[in-house]
Every structure is written in structure tokens, then in C-alpha cells.
Amino acid sequence: MYKATHCIAILGLFAGTVAAQPAQEVKPSSQSGKDSKDATRVKQPPKDMLDAVLPNWLRISVTARGRWEDGVTNMVGNVTDNYYLSRLRLDVQVKPVSWLSFYTQIQDARAMNYDKGQPAASMQDPLDLRLAYVQLGNSGEGSGQWIRVGRQEIQYGNQRIFGNGDWSNAGREFDAVRARYYRPGASAEFIAGSVVLQDPSRFDRHKPGEHFYGTYDTFDRIVPGASVEPYFFLKTTLNVAGETGSHGNSSEYVTGLRFAGKLPGRFDYALEALHEGGNYATDHISAFGAVYSAGWTVTRSHWTPRISADYDYASGDNNTKDGVRGTFDQMYGNPQPFFSVTGLFGWKNLREYREGIDFVPRKNVKIIVDYRDYNLATIQDGLYNGPGTRVFLNRKATSDHVGDGVETRIAITWPRAITTSFGVGALFSGTYLHQSAQYGTYLYPYFTWVKRF
């Protein structure tokens, strides 16, 4: 009732704002900049049948999504459950003039037939205000600048450090202020804010005592056919405990560079390197992460097969008493950082290798097949799940091989704005899991559908 009352009040206030707008013919501008690699674009409600009856300054859309999965609820003991995730989003955008827009999104996310205790907040967050911001300026083509204030999604690069976590049922959002300045071939964005924590029992709020600040820049004319993306972020946290038990505040910074582009002969690539430093209470932070990706589109035929491979590295802490924190912090990255079907492992103390192929047998069908191999960066640190929580710690193990597996996904686009996707992932436990008393094969099937109104 608490959350429903707040959502109704916000919608009422928003309706009053809408009613007060003059019925002028202002064409809605594109919410995406020319550079798509930095993924800072606003998700504008798609044009649909409502456009024919609504004034140009108003856009309303509804998106429904459902996913059945036989997923793991606790990696320790391989506890699984069969359940259905439902998600409904109502998007409203008001753009009275070209340089001013208001955006809000109400979401209802629920987990049905979930039998293993209380669902995580990322799975079930009933009726809540997910997004609400005002933007000054126009994020269109060419040159310009804008500032956006309020609750919003944030995505940068390949969502390794900042991502919206769309695979999770509730997603991720931030209370933030963002300012972007862009010109042909270059853009600079500055940001300050705090991550929002989902709370099924009351109105979602940002995480107290934790804030971030930084900049993400993009240059796509320095190297022909490539995008160069340097970035810097600072995360501050109050009252944390160091390795020796001492308490204090944390100031963690990450410096990174992403380099992505295409080469002659239908080759593509992406390289990203990150260094984390600063202090965590009385500890010194020194961690590293790297991503190496390459792909080749075999032919220009109808199926357009593409072969690709990735190598992802995130450092671990090989000494928990030396006052140096070596475990890489994935910060606010995608909870499935490797875009894996199973999504069991986080980007911390891990070496992950993937090779695969994707092809399009029909123009509305895409098939992806991947092989993955997982190893710890150091045995002295543990194994972390997708959200970044350590679930196994076995310093007596003699092998760092976590396991390997095969994944298959099929995505189909249907008429009337309907998409479906189904897949299955299999993980075969390696020597490290065997030595940690975790045996067997983990099988994860899923089916999801999305409909836009």
C-alpha cells in the first residue's frame, strides 16, 4: 500500500504536468546520440498505435515481459527452483519544447511459484517508481549538450562497470546528475550519484553512505573505424572494515580505457583495461581487470555467420593479511558480466574464456552457441557469484579450474512488437568445485517473451 500510494501520487503529479502543457506541434527528437558505443542513450518509448491519438509532445507506452527459468537460487549446494518472473513497465514522456523533457517509468516486478524462501529484491519489487528525471537540452544528432537530473538508467561501454542489469527482473537504476557535451567525433560526460536499492516492502531509495563521481569520454575519429573511450570513476563508501578489522571510509577509483572498432575483411574487436586504486579503511586497493574480444563475420551470405572469442580477467586477493585489497570490484556492472546464459559467476578473481558462433538463418531469427571455460585468478581468493558475493572459499584446493560449459540461445522477432527468446546453459564442474565438495552438472533452461504496446 505504501509503494502504491506513492506511485499513484507521482502519476497524479505527472498527469497535472501533462494537462498544463500546450497542445503544440513539436516533433519529438531522437533520444540517441550519434555515437552508440557509450550506451548513454535514453530509452524512448517506441512509436506505436498510441502515437496516432496522442499529441506530439506526449509519448506513452507499456512493455510486458515474462520469463520462465529453472534457475539456481543458492550456488552452495546447487539449490535450484522452477519459477516465473513477470515484469510490467509503464513509460511516460512529456516534451513540451525541444530543449525540455520529463520522463517517468512505473514498474511492477514479481516472482511467481518461487519456493525457496523470499525472492531477492532483484527478482521481486512490486509497483514502484523506477525512473523519473528531467532533461534540459537535446540529445540529438550533431553538436549539443544536455543535463539530466533524477532517477535514471546508466550504461557505459560494454556495461562492465555501469549497466542497467536488464536480465534481472527489477533491473538497476541510479539517482544521479549527468551532464553531456558532444560534438561530431567526440563527447564528454560527467556524472555524480548513488545506486538505487530495490525494496519490495517500500519505496526504493538510493544506497545510504555510498556515492560515485566520474567522467566517460568517447572519441570516434582518432582511429579510423574505431572508438576510443577513456573513463575515470570514484566510489566513496562510509564505515567499511579492512582486512585487519579496522574500520574507516573507502575512496576507490577506477581508471579505464576501452578501444573498439572494425577492421578490413569483416573483422571486429574490443579491448578494455582497468586499474583500481585508493583506500578501503586502512587497506590499500590495487586491482586489475581486462577484456579482449575479437570477431569475424565469415561471409556476407544470408545467414551471416560470425565467429568470436573473448578473454576476461579480474584480479583476486592472494593475501588477506597484507593490507592490500587485490580483488577486482565490478562496481555497478552487469550482474551477468559475460552475458552468459547461466550467469553464475561475477567479474571478480576470475579468468573466463569464451568462443562461439552466431548466425541468422532467417531475418527474424538469431542463434548463438558459446563454449565457456572458467578459472580462478588465484586460489587464495574465493569464487564470486554474478552480483559479486563470495560463495566458495577453499584455499587448500590444488586446482583453479572452476568448470566449463556450453550455452545456446535462440531469439525470434515476431509481428506486433513481440519478441521471444529461449535457451539452455550447461555448466560442468571442474576440479576446484570438486575439491570444494561441489559435484555434478548444472543445467539452466529458460524462456522469455516481450510485448510492447
Image (tube, grey):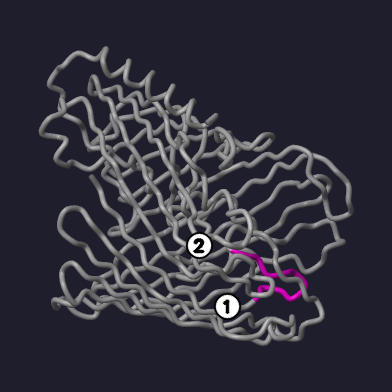
Magenta stretch: residue 379 in it? Answer: yes
Q: Which residues are magenta?
A: 376-385
Q: Judging from the image, what secondary structure is the residue with disc 2 in?
A: loop
The answer to whether 363 is drawn above or below residue 155 in the figure is below
Q: Nearer the viewer, residue 309 or 430?
A: 430
Which percent across, then down, holds residue 37? 35, 52
Residue wearing tag 2: 336
Looking at the rendered structure, the kind of residue marked 2 is Gln
The answer to whether 133 is drawn above or below residue 444 in the figure is above
Q: Main secondary structure of the magenta part?
A: loop
Q: Judging from the image, what secondary structure is the residue with disc 1 in?
A: strand
Which percent across, then down, holds residue 107? 42, 40
Q: Which mark is residue 283?
A: none
The answer to whether 388 is drawn above or below residue 374 in the figure is above
Which percent across, then down, holds residue 402? 63, 80
Looking at the rendered structure, the kind of residue marked 1 is Tyr
